[in-house]
Image (cartoon, grey):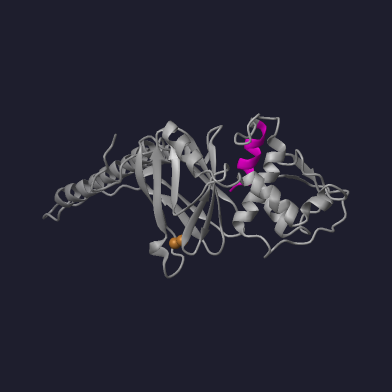
Amino acid sequence: MNPGSHFAPPEASTIAPWVDGLLAYLTIASFLTTLLVAALVVVFLIRYRQRPNRHARQIRGSLPLEIGWTIAPLIVMLTFFFAGASVYSRYQRPPQGAMDVYVVAKQWMWTLQHPQGPREKDALHVPMGTPVRLIMTSEDVVHSFFAPAFRIKQDVLPNRTTQTWFEATEPGRYRLYCAEYCGTSHSNMKGWITVMEPQEFQAWLEDAGQGPSMAAAGEKLFQQLGCAQCHAGTCPPLGGLFGSSVPLEDGSLVTADIDYLRNSILNPQAQIVAGYPPQMPTFKGQVTESELQQLIAYIRSLSEQGAAGSSQAPPSGVRSDIEEGVR
Ligand code: CUA
């Protein structure tokens, strides 16, 4: 498709032409405005230059003029707003059935894990023509996931989950960068995203899929950390929890999304479920961000079994809840 130029990398995602179109529109509109102002400066310089016995006619306000120069820029600015908002909302909302990839940023490396199990370092393999949603968090400082060819850039923050998505349109290898200064080796925090034909990707996934799935790894952790003993007994049950509304002790309701689960594991006293004693210890320092993602993948899988028939595709009801929770 677009091979890229000196000015921009190739357009390799569905959103890229929209971002480039918006940028072109803003650039052209700014250029035309500059041209108009510059031309008027020149015209007025000549037309109203000082001449003997000529004096400008003074006017004291003009309603039509004032309305004109208020309304015209307003309309132009509103087109900026609507064009920008339309691209932004497309960019912020992953389509239904997107493929998830869990991302952990750490000084100075990207770790990306597929729910099926394969984990990649500074590399990501994805199929062409499938929306890919990145569920991201940081082990330490603020990083930023930047894939110029896909026109996506999203901050990755510690103690929080952020997301972004893209759908690749052309097979190939594309650059991944960290776009937030994160310490000495920030400039080395980069990698490659490989876009493959769907069948090729399936083969790659099967080849790479040695280890357990994220949900299976999470289940193992769940046993090892002793979560199972309590959550089978006196603690809130976890089956069907993900995406549901949880009544809290203070009478409020909270959606059991990724951030809620994360917070409940690290900071269990913060949101006490109504009707249960506040007896859960914190697991802060005992689990890494990757392990947390596995635990969350496991808890998610408890809500997805039977609902969607596949452990990868969350049922539609769950999706919107995840999105609300992922900022
Ligand atoms: Cu990570 Cu810059």
Residue drawn at the location 40% of the way across and 46% of the way down:
193
Residue 233 vs residue 134: left or right? Answer: right
Examine the rendering and report whether any part of residue 258 can be seen: no
Ligand 1 placement by image quarter:
bottom left
- Image coordinates for residue 171, horizontal then vertical, percent: 36, 37
Residue 214 vs residue 123: left or right? Answer: right
- Image coordinates for residue 206, horizontal then vertical, percent: 50, 39
The picture quadrant where one finds residue 290 is bottom right
Residue drawn at the location 72% of the way across and 39% of the way down:
302
Count of numbered circles in the view: 0
Residue drawn at the location 79% of the way across and 61% of the way down:
281
Q: Nearer the viewer, residue 25 or 7?
A: 7
- Image coordinates for residue 95, horizontal then vertical, percent: 53, 33
Residue drawn at the location 40% of the way across and 33% of the way down:
197
Q: Nearer the viewer, residue 65 or 227?
A: 227
Quarter in which the N terminus is drawn: top left
- Residue 323 shown in magenta: yes
Q: Which of 151 and 223 is in front in this view?
A: 223
- Image coordinates for residue 44, horizontal then vertical, percent: 19, 49
Magenta stretch? 317-327
- Residue 86 shown in magenta: no
Q: Is residue 248 above or below residue 321?
A: below
Examine the rendering and report whether any part of residue 326 can be seen: yes
Taking the view exactly as shown, the residue that stands out farthest to the left is 52
Residue 265 vs residue 171: left or right? Answer: right
**SS assignment for the magenta stretch, majority:** helix
Residue 185 vs residue 161: left or right? Answer: left
Q: Which of 41 and 264 is in front in this view?
A: 264
